[in-house]
Amino acid sequence: MHSVVKTVPKAKDRIKLLSYNIQGGITTKAYHHYLMKSWQHVLPHPHKQENLDYVAKLISDYDIVGLQETDAGSFRSDYMNQTEYLANEAHFPYWYDQVNRNMGKLAQHSNGLLCRYKPISVSEHKLPGLIPGRGALMAKFELSGSTITVITVHLALGRKTRMKQISFLSEIIKSESNIVLMGDLNCELESKEMKYLFKQTHIKQPKRKPHTFPSWQPKKNIDHILISEGLTINEVNVLQKGVSDHLPVSIDIQLTEQYVNH
């Protein structure tokens, strides 16, 4: 881990964040690839590193990056911690890895967080579900005397389990200010789960609904970067490039002036 520390930005400076489900470095450009390339979920392949090099260039312009479906260093990733590799290649001084489904040497499914600012604190939360393997990685940053909390998640495929996970996250979010919730939530903005989140917390419902899945013909908005009322959005984008079955989503934010501590 590098020791270089970037200067903490002033209150009105912008922070650029990106969220990306990298699918373990696997290329998916059509539905039939799920079958044809399914072996890459359990076996190593040199093309994965090429994809990671591409991702490193893609994320290098951002301040905070949340990753889903990374591998913490197992047989399928050729024992490479993919979050660490991306941090080094994209020159992020701080990186954090949350292993959510540890299958030993075979696979270590993880969330990752890359930062150009040193967090005040980093914590891990296991999300509820019948099958363990979903988590939330939470980091707090100081910005001009105020705290911004960034939560990176990858929610379950099943609606009932997702609702339990959203309910769990809502309780955490209620106790925090200046929240950024980002990740592969596996549900769209109009879903019952998201409506519950907006009702129970101070997370704002976004005006835009950028589609991120599937990457080759995006029709669903299931990858999100959501913010609380203490933050202002300057720009939201979906990057029309990538390697996995998801497209990366980015956001440019700053503290709303009345929420800045003087």
Image (cartoon, rainbow, N blue to C red):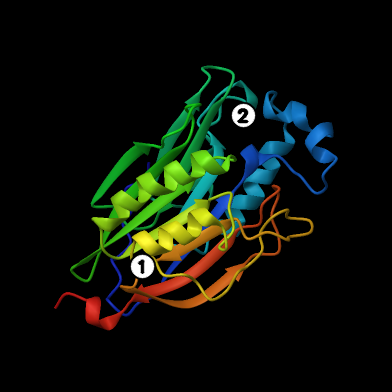
Residue at the image position 73 percent from the left and 60 percent from the top: 218
Q: Is residue 155 visible?
A: no
The quadrant in which residue 6 appears is bottom left
Question: Label 2 sits on what residue type?
Answer: Ser
Residue 35 in the figure: left or right of residue 152: right
Q: Which residue is drawn at 56% across and 62% down?
A: 189
Q: Element under label 1?
A: loop
Q: Which of marks 1 and 2 is nearer the N terminus?
A: 2
Residue beneath label 2, please?
77
Evaluate whether residue 51 shows in this view. yes
Which amino acid type corresponds to the residue marked 1 in the rendered image? Answer: Ser
Q: Position of residue 202 (x, y in %)?
A: 33, 66
Against 90, is 31 above or below? above
Q: What element carries label 2?
A: helix
Splitting the image into 4 quarters, where does residue 178 fall? bottom left
* Residue 134, x across and y down, in percent: 47, 35
Mark 1: few/some/many CA within 10 Å (<14, 14-19, 20+): many
Q: Looking at the image, which is closer to me, 192 or 82?
A: 192
Residue 9 screen position, x and y as percent: 30, 71
Name the image quarter holding residue 213. Answer: bottom right
Q: Is residue 72 left or right of residue 157?
A: left
The spot of residue 62 in percent (x, y) is 48, 63
Q: Residues within 10 Å of mark 2 (few under 14, many from 20)?
A: many
Q: In which quarter of the image is the N terminus?
A: top left
Location of residue 55 with respect to 236 vertically, above or below: above
Q: Residue 49 carries which label?
A: none
In this view, the residue farthest toward the left is 262
Name the residue tied to disc 1.
228
- Residues at marks 1 and 2, CA–CA distance in whole angstroms: 36 Å
Q: Which residue is drawn at 28% across and 66% down?
A: 8
Left or right, 192 with respect to 139, comes to: right
Instruction: Locate the C terminus and report the quarter of the image it occupies.
Output: bottom left
